[in-house]
Image: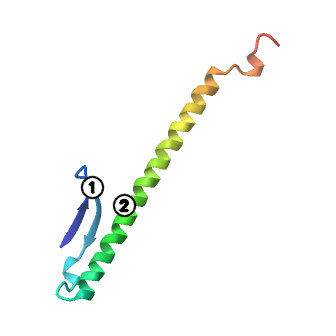
Amino acid sequence: MKFVLMNDDGDAVAEIENLEQYDLSTTRGRAMLLDDILVALGHADRRVVLDMIRERRDRAERAMEAANALRPHPSRDPTR
């Protein structure tokens, strides 16, 4: 059996597999499940942050390329 963690938008962000391995009748078993959920959420948060960094880097690179395209190149400058 699999436990799927969803974000506020309803997208799956993490999964906990083999729920039957946890003995939920004991405090230790419940604590182990909670630990695994927190680790899965941490990984999901890290992926979100890494995706955000990649998007910002891509946007910044595109902005720099656009700015460079507008700037006259010295070899094409007619005043020289």
Q: Amino acid at mark 1?
A: Asn
* CB-based contact (under 8 Å), mark 2 and mark 1: yes
Across and down, in percent, residue 59 comes to 50, 37
Residue that extends furthest to the top in the rendered view of this protein: 79
Q: How many marks?
A: 2
Q: Look at the image and tell me in which quarter the C terminus lies.
A: top right
Q: Is residue 75 above or below residue 42?
A: above
What is the distance, in whole Å, between disc 2 and disc 1 at their CAs?
10 Å
Q: Earlier in the sequence, mark 2 or mark 1?
A: 1
Q: Amino acid at mark 2?
A: Ala
Question: Badge 1: few (under 14), some or many (20 or more) residues near its Cα, within 10 Å?
Answer: few
Q: Which residue is mark 1?
A: 7
Using residue 43 as the reference point, say whether residue 25 is left or right of it: left
Is 57 in front, or is 77?
A: 57
Residue located 51% across and 40% down the image: 58
Q: Which of the 4 image quadrants contains residue 64?
A: top right
Q: Which residue is mark 2?
A: 44
Question: Badge 2: few (under 14), some or many (20 or more) residues near its Cα, within 10 Å?
Answer: some
Residue located 39% across and 64% down the image: 43
Across and down, in percent, residue 18 comes to 23, 77
The kind of secondary structure element at disc 2 is helix
Is 50 in front, or is 34?
A: 34
Q: Look at the image and tell me in which quarter the N terminus lies.
A: bottom left
Q: Which of the 4 image quadrants contains residue 4?
A: bottom left
Q: Is residue 11 above or below residue 55?
A: below
Across and down, in percent, residue 37 comes to 30, 71
Using residue 41 as the reference point, say whether residue 58 is left or right of it: right
